[in-house]
Image (spheres, rainbow, N blue to C red):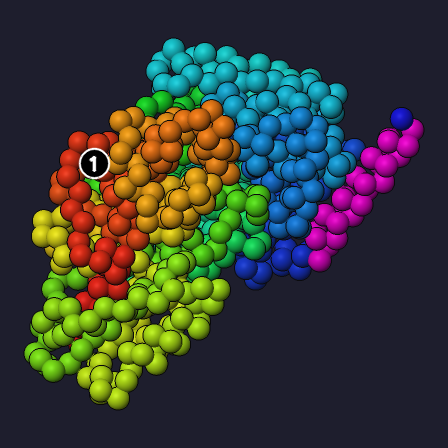
Amino acid sequence: MGYALNKKNITQLGARLLVQSFVLRNLKNKRKNAPVIDKIKLKTGELLLDGYKKSKISVLSGFLLPAEILHLYGVSPMFTEFLAPITTIVDRAPDFLKSSELEGMSRDTCTFHRSTLGAYLEHYLPDYQLVVGTSHLCDGQNKTLEEMADRMRAPYMLIDVPQHDTLDAREYLASQLRELEDKLIGLTGRQKATSRDWERVMAQSNRSRELLLRMNELRSRPGSFLYGVEGFNLNLISLLLMGTQFLTDNLSGLVRELESCCTHGIDDDSCYRILWLLAYPYVQDYRITDMAEEMGIKPVMDELSSVSWEPLDPANPYYSLAGKILQSPFLGSVENRIRNAKDLIQEHNVDGVLHFSHWGCRQGCGAVRALSDKMDELGVPFLELHGDCIDDRQFGEGQIKTRLASFAELMKRTRTTGNSVNTDQDSLYLGIDVGSETAKAVLVDANQNIYSREVFYTGASAKKAISRLYEHIYSDRLSSRIKGCVATGYGRNAVFFADEVITEITCHARGMAHSVQGVRTIIDIGGQDTKAIAVDQNGGVRKFLMNDKCAAGTGRFLEMMARTLEVDLDDLGPLALRADYPANITSLCSVFAESEVISHIAEDTPMEVIARGVCSSIAQRTLSLLERVGKEEKFAMSGGVAKNTGVVKELERSLGNKLQIPEDPHTIGALGAAMFAADQQ
């Protein structure tokens, strides 16, 4: 026990010295002419350092506890949602997450809280004198805080927050805030705050509120240096400092800085202005915000920065602070969050909405379907990105890049008023689609009629397949006639002779609209992913979803199952058509699904029944995507799996509708790319 305590003291001292070093290195930011954002960052470092000082009283809580009541009694507040990003920035989050998991904390819990707990278990965080949880938004937060309080031997208070903002709810919550005040009086030894004390803190908070509103207005203007994650972080820090003269003074300075550099109007056409929903990722290796910026996607506002509460009333402080908590759009019906997003879209003139679905945040991610449907109704492009704000194990750069590029193309299309007409009748236009299994090439003429198709297996090297395509297509006979080339697919960036790259989402929509007149819903199942795409009457993408995290439900899955059944891949579909019923294959993982197939074989289940079960499992996974993107007739299918008659039949059974299968369905993406190449001429 003595060694453990000694180790704890040494580690905490080291952590304190690191924070103290940060503060000392940045003391220059206290000077009058220092950038305001740097001054605010220094102040948060000082609050963090206060937690390690015996002479200071610090309180740990979630970010929705009103900091005004803590500053009223001279207490230093700290949020778990502020600590967790620091663990990522200093590259210790993986170790801290592992520590919390070894201690028995479920990996289903939000990593903001698991990482914070792990940091304490590893002795990097100080012992706080009081820990306060709130019951709303995140059950992982209050459970984590309760566990930390128990280990710190600190008093723990859970504030029970009702779901709806009513008079009774405010009174109930106000009574708990009075109880919190009693605890603060006991901790600090101070006298109960007077009405003048409350007036001072409330006045500072209301002034900061006005400045945050003005700052949010300015940050979405052209020329603003405060957008994206920087703006998000500043608003989170501001919640930590609400009710202080420091925040009021510095927000005033920041507003002046923004007013001096921002212009009226909107950004130029090369920039797509988006509203960011939920939190930003902090993982250092995530390049989501960088990739977005490279594609011209600019987050001009985020929902967690919205000022949703009314001005505070110093004559009734507890009731007023209760209202501040209850006016969060994340409380109550999902309609509150939808209404807030709609208001922000209109206020900030955005081109699209991006929802970063942080793993483990059930409260945030549970509203995605409703938000997506509303954006579809409003005609606003919507993208959901899956990932984790803290854990770098939940990231795939290639998939994220494809989604972002498709999102940018979707926003670009909403700005397009029409296409030019190409009159060069002798010209040809090339589309290249490089997938996981094959590289496809389609040539179209000036009228966008198909001139030729080519398919090459990529094998172990997509680059070699692309080189073979190039040598074959750019022969002496055709090279002078090919006037443009667009590449698509996962290997699109390797097509060295392409004039432009466009995502497969957009290209499949364009190619299918040309091949199947009147199509509204497209299913594309390739070698490594499944896509569901909703299109309009012109073949433009309205909405899309992808499943590329697992091989289950893709062509790769069919290959695995055919190999397990010891049948040729081409024979799997016809074999499935002979069965009267499907075998039950329920696993969402291709590896476990293979185990189920082996079990069926061992039980002498007829081969055709197993084959139909395999096809049925793909249909059910695809159906879950279609449920979210919308099932509007007519339906069409592209990709190599469209040649599997068993899968097509099971999809038709599930949909209760006929699937239109174009000629050479695996070349639809290349056809769309070729048509875009023709457009650009």
Lateral position of residue 437 relative to residue 102, left or right: left
Picture quadrant of residue 117? top right
Residue drawn at x 38%, y 72% is 466
Q: Amino acid at mark 1?
A: Glu
Q: Which residues are magenta?
A: 2-25
371 shown above or below 416? above
| Residue underneath mark 1 | 652
Label 1 element class:
helix
- The x, y position of residue 175, in whole percent, is 50, 12
Picture quadrant of residue 402? bottom left
34 shown above or below 341? below
Name the foreground residue: 496 vs 464: 464
Q: Is residue 439 magenta?
A: no
Name the foreground residue: 243 vs 627: 627
- The x, y position of residue 439, in whole percent, is 35, 65
Residue drawn at x 18%, y 78% is 428
The N terminus: image quadrant: top right
- The x, y position of residue 271, in whole percent, is 31, 62
